[in-house]
Image: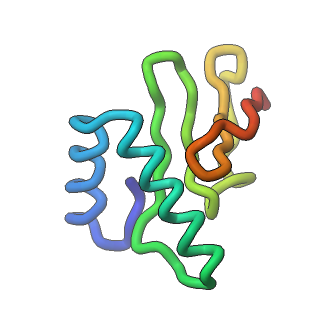
Amino acid sequence: AISPDGALADFLSTTFFVLGRDAVLEAIAQEETLLAQGEQPQFRVIAVDRDHKIYVSPSLRGQVELLEPEQFQIVELSGDEIKKITTD
């Protein structure tokens, strides 16, 4: 998790690690809702799963560059569904 509040970022990172992918997807969906309402989220997410898929908060899309694109894929979500998978 990424946040100006270091304690929040640490707490959320641990929480996402323990709860897994579904918690990450829910946080990303909540950020999409906030952004659609014109609000800014308190944190953003970049998470990598066991299959080397990278989940990125909507507000960070286009700002993440893969240095080893043959090993990782960026997953874009729409709500809680996968919209597309890109390899840069």
Q: Give the residue drawn at x 62%, y 84%.
A: 38
Q: Nearer the viewer, residue 73 or 27?
A: 27
Tell me where residue 68 appears, x and y as whole percent: 66, 22
Decide if residue 21 is on the left or right side of residue 61. Answer: left
Q: Nearer the viewer, residue 19 or 70?
A: 19
Q: Give the residue drawn at x 63%, y 58%.
A: 58
Q: How is the image coloured?
A: rainbow
Q: Give the residue drawn at x 40%, y 34%.
A: 21
Above or below, comparing residue 87 to residue 25 in the picture? above
Decide if residue 11 is on the left or right side of residue 50. Answer: left
Tell me where residue 84 appears, x and y as whole percent: 75, 35
Assign the C terminus to one quadrant of the image: top right
Decide if residue 68 is on the left or right side of residue 55. Answer: right
Tell me where residue 11 appears, x and y as whole percent: 20, 55
Q: Give the residue drawn at x 54%, y 21%.
A: 52
Which quarter of the picture shows residue 80? top right
Tell me where residue 35 appears, x and y as whole percent: 61, 74
Which quarter of the picture shows residue 37? bottom right
Instruction: Give the mark count.
Output: 0
Above or below, comparing residue 25 to residue 51 in the picture? below
Decide if residue 17 is on the left or right side of residue 28. Answer: left
